[in-house]
Amino acid sequence: MNVKLIGITGGSGSGKSTVVRKISEAHPDSICIAQDNYYKSASFVNNHNILAFNFDHPDAFDMDLMVENLKDLKAGKAIDMPQYDFVKHQRKPETKHIEPKTIIIVDGLMVLYDKRIRDLLDLKLFVDTPSDIRFVRRLQRDIKERGRTVESVVEQYINVVRPGHFNFIEPCKEYADLIIPEGGYNEHALDVIIKYIQTVANQL
Ligand SMILES: Nc1ncnc2c1ncn2[C@@H]1O[C@H](COP(=O)(O)OP(=O)(O)O)[C@@H](O)[C@H]1O
Ligand SMILES: Nc1ccn([C@@H]2O[C@H](COP(=O)(O)O)[C@@H](O)[C@H]2O)c(=O)n1
């Protein structure tokens, strides 16, 4: 089986998931692997001790398992992908069975950071969105969907999200094949990427 892996990275709130959703809508036969699913469990964390675990450091992820799962998919083997709960800060008891497909979209904060993942990717994209916009999006999303308070979002952003972005995410721009300004609503950029993936898929 000839498989192509497309990696999408960018800061928190940059629009990665939105880009993934739009690509998958255009290529319903693709599968998405979100790096968020590979977060290590930290169930002791809550809104009052949000800094007790640094979710914006490469060590926060089970990279070994993610690399193993991506290698299996690339080799045409099915995987059981972990699932993650952002409210409880822990891995869910259930996994998701994923059959291999020819187009695999991999997204997450550190997908270009880890060389082993980088080397598996056939196309590397970086979603580039200014930090003030990312912060506002994150504030709204984390309160609405991830059970957070304004105070915990601000504390986490200032102390770990922002430094993590500059230390680990922004430097990975140099590895990207394409940089997408503003993310999921950049129709022209998405158009080009979707057409490219279609061309690649037709050749597989
Ligand atoms: N270009 C955009 N304009 C306005 N809102 C956007 C845009 N892209 C994403 N969003 C919104 O911002 C939030 C974060 O986007 P998301 O795709 O989840 O980012 P990420 O996966 O990088 O954290 C979501 O609520 C999403 O609907
Ligand atoms: N339990 C967790 C796990 C992660 N985070 C934050 O999520 C961000 C990554 O997700 P995006 O969809 O925004 O890319 C990351 O910046 C972590 O700080 C969290 O708050 N709690």
Image (cartoon, helix red, strand yellow):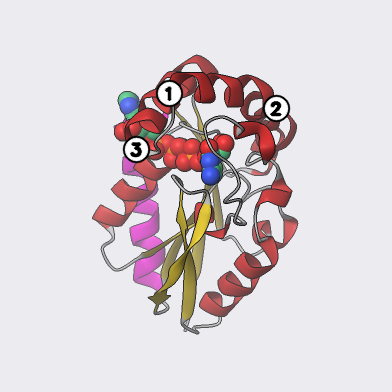
- Asked if the magenta segment contains residue 46, the reply would be no
Give the label on residue 96, or none. Answer: none
Quarter of the image that includes the C terminus: bottom left
- Residue bounds of the magenta highlight: 182-204
**Label 1, label 2: how far apart the Cα atoms are:** 19 Å
Q: Please tell me whether mark 1 or mark 2 is closer to you in this view.
A: 1
Question: Magenta part mainly helix, strand or loop?
Answer: helix
How many labels were placed on the picture? 3
Q: Which amino acid type is shown beneath numbered disc 3? A: Glu
Instruction: Give the mark, 1 or 2, whose residue is nearer the N terminus.
Output: 1
Q: Quadrant of residue 54?
A: top right
Q: 10 Å neighbourhood of mark 3: few (<14), some, or many (≥20)? A: few
Residue at (39, 44) in percent of width and height: 17
Residue behind mark 2: 166
Residue behind mark 1: 139
Residue behind mark 3: 145
Q: Which amino acid type is shown beneath numbered disc 2? A: Phe
Report the side of 160 relative to 19 (left or right).
right
| 47 up-or-down from 159: above or below | below
Q: What element carries label 2?
A: helix
Residue sitting nearer the eye, 69 or 153? 153
| 175 up-or-down from 139: above or below | below
| 169 up-or-down from 124: above or below | above
Q: Quadrant of residue 66?
A: bottom right
**Relative image position of residue 167 (x, y in whole percent):** 74, 31
Residue at (70, 27) in percent of width and height: 166
Report the side of 58 relative to 19 (left or right).
right
Residue sitting nearer the eye, 2 or 140? 140
